[in-house]
Image (tube, grey):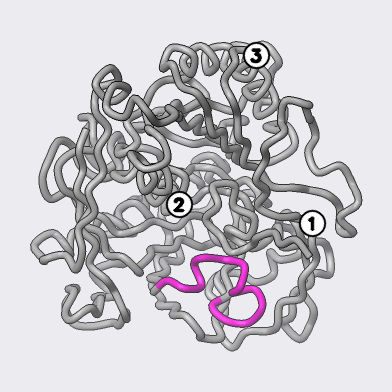
């Protein structure tokens, strides 16, 4: 599977009479985008805003972030199973408006949604303070169930993202990156002197409003399966969940999986990257046992020397992480875990809900319980009062002067468990 990703660098975003990309500037026809976004009888209103790095702007509650992409050549299209058919993606060429992002906000669905500050201390914790953001504020009609509300806003964001991505279809990219994974026997034989590595990609699937989709299928309904890594770059995996903002993987992060990109960057140099195994995070013990058994079986079948395992979320999924670690390790395969921590506001509590001696190589995204004070912003896109109820906040988090005191759990991407963030550990 070979995919060329053509990046078209976006240095600014502006409203204009015509939607187009010209000289690195994304011009957006506000009315046209609102009509595309709101093309659903269940939507009461759509408003379109721009949020740029350095501005005194806050977006709250953040539901999803999507990177504008378009399929130029190859099978299928972007966001398969939702915006196109279910042809296998991850081949051909895809163009990306690199540096731009489509952000969805609106009335809150659940309590686990987040904040993006474009400046101030909060901006230092989220990668989306650095992107040129087109924000669609989508409010559904009254009376929808929560799962319907989430689906309506999710699809509205997908429509908006596809609309923006299409603007790059005929443009010449500023750079082209090529990613390739060959059929497994051919790939395994290509670099016989290098250690063989697989990536176990855990997806959040813990129940209602904790959903991730693969080719349009709710991943809680799948058994672990092999995925060509390039499929992720075309949006084969999308977010549909309302988990805590700090370690939620928005659709944008799946499209830019830093684990996959880093494995490709070092492929053929430090190790032989054989591919991905996607698996779910379950609620019942039986389901956890089934998925971890099958995950370990697939890792063994690939014949790798080591597996990188990433988590999404915390608490209950910690058990899935530990089960995957234990069962893969028992097969004589080294494991490296990527997670974050909920160690209490003082950092003194147990970081994970489960643990194992086999987990002796762990990368942390940081402590989500760390408290931060976010200054008031001149512009608020969305509904700032939800700061008092979203995970990581509390009654009184939002002060009368517009400041917010909360845990960094409220910040979108603050402790991302794919490493798509800014926190790091240092030894003194």
Residue at mark 3 to residue at mark 1: CA–CA distance: 33 Å
At label 3, counting other C-alpha atoms closer than 10 Å, the crowd grade (few under 14, some 14-19, many 20 or more) is few
For residue 73, what is the image quadrant?
A: top left
**Mark toward the start of the polypeptide (3 vs 1):** 3
Where is 312 relative to 387, above or below?
Answer: above
406 relative to 168 in the view: left or right = right
Q: Earlier in the sequence, mark 2 or mark 1?
A: 2
Magenta stretch: residue 382 in it?
Answer: no
Which of the labelled discs sits on residue 199, or is there none? none
Mark 3 residue element: loop
Question: x, y (%) of residue 110?
Answer: 64, 49
CB under 8 Å between callouts 2 and 1?
A: no
The kind of secondary structure element at disc 2 is: helix
Q: Quadrant of residue 184?
A: top left
- Looking at the rendered structure, the secondary structure element under dot 1 is loop
Whether pointer 3 and pointer 1 mark residues with C-beta atoms closer than 8 Å, the reply is no
54 over 36 or under it: above or below = below
Q: Position of residue 242 (x, y in %)?
A: 59, 46
Q: CA distance from mark 3 to mark 2?
A: 31 Å
Using the image, determine if residue 358 lies above or below residue 372.
above
Q: Residue at x 28, y 44 (%)?
A: 234
Residue 287 x, y percent position in the rendering:
62, 15
Mark 1 = which residue?
369
**Quarter of the image containing the C terminus?**
bottom right
Say which mark, if any, is on residue 253.
2
Q: Mark 3 sits on what residue?
A: 330
Q: Which residues are magenta?
A: 118-131
Q: Earlier in the sequence, mark 3 or mark 2?
A: 2
- Residue 292 % position (x, y): 59, 17
Q: Residue at x 40, y 78 (%)?
A: 50
Identity of the residue drawn at 65% across and 13% down? 330
Question: Marks 2/1: CA distance?
Answer: 22 Å
């Amino acid at each position: 599977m070979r995919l060329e990703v053509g990046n078209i660098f976006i240095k600014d975003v502006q409203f204009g009479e015509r939607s187009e990309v010209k000289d690195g500037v994304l011009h957006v026809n506000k009315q046209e985008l609102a009509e595309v976004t709101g093309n659903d009888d269940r939507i009461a209103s759509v408003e379109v805003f721009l949020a740029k790095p350095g501005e005194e702007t806050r977006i709250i509650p953040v539901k999803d972030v999507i990177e504008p992409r378009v399929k130029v050549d190859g099978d299928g299209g972007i966001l398969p199973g939702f915006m196109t058919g279910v042809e296998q993606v991850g081949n051909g060429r895809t163009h990306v408006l690199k540096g731009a992002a489509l952000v969805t906000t609106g009335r809150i669905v659940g309590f686990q949604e987040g904040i993006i500050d474009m400046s101030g201390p909060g901006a230092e914790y989220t990668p989306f303070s650095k992107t040129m953001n087109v924000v669609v504020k989508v409010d559904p009609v009254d009376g929808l169930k929560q799962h319907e509300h989430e689906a309506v806003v999710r699809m509205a964001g997908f429509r908006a993202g596809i609309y923006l991505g299409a603007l790059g279809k005929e443009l010449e990219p500023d750079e082209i990156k090529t990613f390739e994974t060959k059929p497994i026997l051919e790939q395994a034989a290509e670099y016989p002197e290098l250690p063989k590595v697989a990536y176990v990609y855990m997806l959040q699937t813990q129940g209602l409003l904790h959903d991730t989709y693969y080719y349009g299928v709710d991943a809680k309904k799948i058994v672990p399966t092999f995925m060509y890594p390039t499929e992720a770059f075309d949006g084969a995996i999308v977010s549909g969940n309302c988990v805590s903002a700090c370690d939620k993987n928005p659709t944008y992060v799946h499209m830019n999986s830093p684990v996959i990109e880093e494995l490709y960057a070092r492929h053929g140099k430090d190790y032989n990257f054989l591919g991905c195994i996607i698996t779910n995070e379950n609620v019942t013990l039986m389901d956890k046992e089934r998925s971890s058994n099958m995950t370990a079986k697939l890792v063994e079948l690939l014949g790798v020397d080591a597996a990188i395992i990433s988590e999404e979320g915390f608490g209950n999924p910690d058990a899935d992480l530990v089960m995957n670690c234990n069962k893969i390790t028992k097969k004589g395969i080294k494991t490296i875990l990527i997670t974050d921590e909920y160690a209490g506001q003082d950092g003194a509590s147990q970081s994970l809900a489960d643990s194992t001696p086999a987990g002796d190589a762990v990368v942390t995204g940081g402590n989500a319980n760390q408290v931060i004070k976010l200054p008031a912003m001149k512009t608020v896109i969305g509904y700032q009062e939800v700061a008092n109820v979203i995970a990581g906040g509390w009654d009184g988090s939002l002060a009368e002067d517009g400041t917010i005191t909360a845990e960094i759990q409220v910040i979108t991407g603050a402790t991302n468990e794919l490493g798509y963030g800014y926190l790091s550990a240092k030894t003194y």
